[in-house]
Each structure stands twice: as structure tokens, then as C-alpha cells.
Amino acid sequence: MAKRIDVSGLTAYYGSHKAIDDISMSVEPRSVTAFIGPSGCGKSTFLRTLNRMHEVTPGGRVEGKVLLDDENLYGSGVDPVAVRRTVGMVFQRPNPFPTMSIFDNVAAGLRLNGTYKKSDLKDIVEKSLKGANLWNEVKDRLGKPGSGLSGGQQQRLCIARAIAVEPQVLLMDEPCSALDPISTLAVEDLIGELKERFTIVIVTHNMQQAARVSDRTAFFNLAAVGQPGKLVEIDDTERIFSNPSVQATEDYISGRFG
Amino acid sequence: MTDVMTDRRPLTGQPGDPLPVSLKQARLPRWSPPVIALVSAAAGCGIGLAAGLDSRIQWGLIAALLFIVGTYALAAAVEGRRQAKDRLATSLVWIAFLLAVIPLASLLWETVARGSKVLDGYFLSHSMGTLPDAMPGGGIYHAIIGTLEQVGLATLIAAPLGLFTAIYLVEYGRGRLAKVVTFFVDVMTGIPSIVAGLFVLSVWILILGFGPSGFAGSMALAILMMPVVVRSTEEMLKLVPNELREASLALGVPKWRTILKVVLPTSIGGITTGVMLAIARIAGETAPVMLLVWGAKTINSNPFEDAQQSLPLYVFQQWQQGSEASYDRAWAAALVLIAFVMVLNLVARGIARWKAPSTGR
Ligand SMILES: Nc1ncnc2c1ncn2[C@@H]1O[C@H](COP(=O)(O)OP(=O)(O)OP(=O)(O)O)[C@@H](O)[C@H]1O
Ligand SMILES: [Mg+2]
């Protein structure tokens, strides 16, 4: 199921503004890779190039290659819709569909794609909610609106929604930044479980979180404000946090940044 | 709750004032504004009478002025300058509100008072037929049918066109074409209804050679309605947070399905409200109907052939007749028209509330 990602020479623009420059890296299947780096260095931008969400932004443009098990996402004839079905995404702010119930939110991806059997829907929703550690909290109110949940529950609902379509890669952009420590822990545990099945990439500003959940860590930086962001290094998380090969990484992690 | 907590301005004073010792402050009692209003209204009437002013408007202005000055002076004396200014602003807002409401209320009052005279079941269920104009009797059934059909057809034309245009502008429109479309929608918003009528007249009747019909009127009404629908729908679609679109796209949902299943359901309440208000707006149009539908005295329920009647045109024609009976009929028809528009407004509000995305627990 899970696929590996190979990025080479990836550059992304917003209009004429170059946001990230010449990034190359590999992400192993069934692993968690964390992106860290100062604000504005292009972590979200890079993440969004991995499922072709970047081009949804007006003026968004990408150069370079992203291989998903040897298939180039930006190759000619590749359908961005198919890419996004394979590479799911969880956003920084929980964004359940306000017109839909909890059940419908989880079922949304399948329903809107029209790719499901009616009889399976209930099972898939239950499985996804269980997978997102939310089942016990919502099993009696599946018909209630999803926006009536707490922030942390909403975020787990969004995770359930993302895993319900069975993607092969799951991208998470600061999924815990709006959550309390307990919900954060729940989501982190969840990431630990999900990596058995998915390839996970997570952006975080929380060093401890990166250290706790990830197998590999990538550090991004930008030379100066207005300059494009670059990948400084990517390595095993343990190494990055104990003995990074680049001085800037150590400075950033130990708080001696800028 | 304590006094201090309910007081919305505990820490007060001019910049130079010494800090207040206590958070509590002398306040005018709650009943003071209505009492001041009553007193100044009475004083306004008194002064008006004494000075022999004929115009009630002058009485009202004097009373308003007294109210403003009185409130300000009292508040300044008791509560201090800053609160006095606050009350001054409040009084001005109230007076502006009254000024806006008075014409509305008196219009409604006048129409109800005069219109209810002949408004009954017979009036609603009969046409004018061959009744002579000066005779009492007759009804507006033919006009109601006409208005419903013309407005309905206009909505069938304008609502989908307007909806799709707005979707194009908000969801797809980038670059030149979108700018051109926006420009023309703006221009269309300003088209006077008589011009829309003349346009359809010259194309449909003079060039293509069709006769007058409800449908011809509908086309002119649709021209008037479309820009309103586009504008209101555009605003509603823009209110849908981008995050929802992205959430849907990131699930691998194609863009058109995202619009259909996520964007439109989220904004459907506001969109229907906009359409309803646009309908209410065109239901009272007279000029294009006069040019294109011509009006009739008998029932014609086929909007595609021959002249029809419509409520606003009926009001106009009855008023023109100038007899006592026709005046009554004009007022009654006007009352029905107002009621129709009001019902539309209420329905629009109901739909907006019913369809609003729920946030409740
Ligand atoms: N929609 C946009 N239009 C134009 N420029 C953008 C847009 N979004 C981001 N940028 C620019 O791209 C650069 C990278 O932004 P990005 O959001 O990827 O940073 P980030 O690393 O995710 O920051 P943060 O940690 O604060 O989320 C920034 O210079 C930003 O100003
Ligand atoms: Mg970001």
C-alpha cells in the first residue's frame, strides 16, 4: 500500500516569487518524516507540492520531479485528482464540512468520488473513526454536525476523513498546532499506528513532537527574508537531534537560531 | 452579576482626568432616554402649537433637536463628557432610524387602510372581464396569474444563468474574460427597466415580429434580474472558506464535484435568499410589462401568446382610470403586491435560517 517518494530538483513559485528552490529528498514507505524549519521557509509549500495542491493556489507553479514509486506526479497525462486520491492531506486548521454530519464528513471522500459500495460505507466510516481514535467519542452522535465537535475532535475527524479514502501517503501540515496536549498526544499515538499502513509526512514547529513521532527529520531554512527556502539536510531523527551534520541545524534545534 | 460587571464602560474619563477612585460612576437611570424623548416630543408639540407652525415636520424637527440637546446636557451634567458624547451618537442613530421607518410605516399603513376596502375572495378570484371601469366590482385574478407566470419564467431564465455566471466568476474566472464579464454585469446592474423593455421590444417584437406576451415581459425582467442574482451569489460563494474547497480537493474530489457538493450546499441558504430578493425586486416592475405584455382585462393563462395582465400594471391602469371604484381596486392590488413581496422575503429568510451551516452541538 504505502509508497515511497523521491523528489528531485523541485522548485515552486507563487507567481514570480520563488518559494522553495531545488529540493531533493527521499521518503521511505511506512515511515514518518518530519519537516522542521523557521516560519516562511516553505514547509507547507513543499508539502503541498507532494499532492499537487500547490497548483490550486492562484499563480502556483512547480518545476522538478516527484516520483511516487517511480511514477512522476508531474508527468504529462497525470491527473491531479488521481494524485490527491493517492496522497491524502490533513490541514493545520481542522476543516470539517459544515453542512455535513460526522458520518457524512468521514464518508465525504468516498461519496464525492462515487467510488464505494453502499453496504461498505458504514464499515469504512467505523473503521476510519476507530483508526482516528474518535469512534468512542462520537459513535452515539454520528448524525450530528461535525462542526459541533471540539477542536481536537474535529482534527481527528479530519484525519478519519483523510484515511477513509485509503490513501498511500498522508501529508499533515502542523496537525497539532491548534490542539491541547491531550489531543496532541492522541494524534501522535495515531500517527504511530498509521505509519504501519501509510507513508506519513508531517510538518511541525514542535521539536519534541518531531523527535517523538518521526523516523527521519528534514530541516528547511531560508538564507534571508524574501529568499526561497532550501532543504538544509535530511537524516535519521536521532542523528538530527543528537549530532546533525550542518551547524545551522544544531543552532535551530537548540534555539540559537537567527 | 454586579453593577460593575454590567457596566460596559467602567474605566472612564477624558485623557487628562484624574483616575477614577472607584470603578462605579454616576449613571442616568435606564428609563431616562424614553422619558426625555416623551418630554421633548411634548415640548415640540407645545412650541409648534404656540408658534402657530402648520407643518408637523417642523414640530418633529423641534422635538428631535430638543431630544438631542436635552440628552447631551443631562448626560454631560450627570455622567461626564465622554458618556454624553456616547449618548449623543446613540440619539442620532435613533433619530436616523425613525426617519427611515416613518415613511415605510406610513406607506404600509396607507396601503392597508385603503386597500382592504375591496380586498376579498371575490376580488382575488375574478378578472375584470367586461366590467366598465367606473363600476365597482371586478378583481385581479388575471393580474395575479400574469405576475406569477411572468416572474416565474423570468426566474427560470435568470436564476440558472446568474448562478452559473457567479460560479464561473468566483471558482474559475481568472484573467481577461472574467474582468469583461464582471464589467458587463456591473453595467447591466444599472440598466433602467424601461431600457430593458425597449431592448426586448425592438428585438423580439419589432425585428422578429412576435406579438406581445407574458414571455416577452419575462425576458426583460430576466435581464433586470440576472445581474442582481450574479452579484448576490458571487458574494455568497466568496464567503465559503477556501479551506473547505481545499479539504475537498485534497480528498481527490474533482473540482466540479467540490463546487456541487461542498461549495454550493454551504452557501445555498444565502444564494436562495439572493434569488428571492431579486424576484421581489422584479415583481413590481411596470415599465417593461407595459411595453411588452400590454395588459389585459380577461384571464389569459398562456404566457406565450397574447397580452397578459400583471399586478403593477393593473395598479397603474386602474389609477389612470380615475374613478372612485378604480382607485379602490388600485390600492387593493397594491396591497396584494406588497403582501406577495413580503411573503417572498419571509420565505427567503426562512430558507436562509434553515439552510445555514449548523455550528451547534
Ligand atoms: N498563497 C500564497 N501566495 C503568495 N505567496 C505565498 C503564499 N503562501 C505562501 N507564500 C510564500 O511562500 C513562502 C513559504 O511559505 P510557507 O507557507 O510554505 O511557509 P511555512 O514554512 O509553511 O511557514 P509556517 O511555518 O509559518 O507555516 C513564504 O515566503 C510565503 O510568503
Ligand atoms: Mg505552514
Image: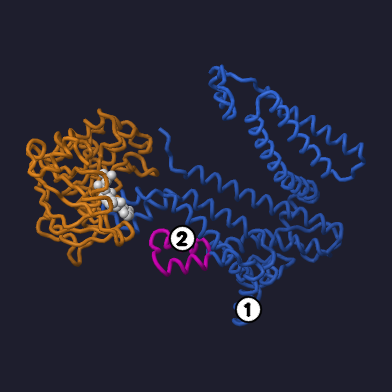
Q: Dot 1: within a 10 Å radius of its alpha carbon, few (fewer than 14), some, or many (20 or more) residues?
A: few
Query: Can you see residue A76?
Result: yes
Asked if the stretch drawn in magenta spans residue B258, the answer is: no
Q: Amino acid at mark 2?
A: Ala
Which quarter of the picture shows residue A140?
top left
Measuring from the top left, give residue B300's x and y in whole percent: 67, 67
Image label count: 2
Residue shown at 78% from the left, 59% from the top: B138
Which quarter of the picture shows residue A131?
top left
**Quarter of the picture holding the C terminus of chain A:** top left
**Left/right of residue B135 with respect to residue A65 in the rendered view:** right
**Left/right of residue B186 with respect to residue A55 in the rendered view:** right
Q: Which chain is blue?
A: B
Q: Nearer the viewer, residue B183 or A198?
A: B183
Q: Marks 2/1: CA distance?
A: 28 Å
Instruction: Identify the residue under disc 2.
Output: B166
Which quarter of the picture shows residue A216?
top left
Chain bearing tag 1 is: B
Instruction: Identify the residue under disc 1.
Output: B202
The mark nearer the N terminus, 2 or 1, is 2
Chain bearing tag 2 is: B
Measuring from the top left, give residue A126's x and y in whole percent: 24, 38
Q: Dot 2: within a 10 Å radius of its alpha carbon, few (fewer than 14), some, or many (20 or more) residues?
A: many
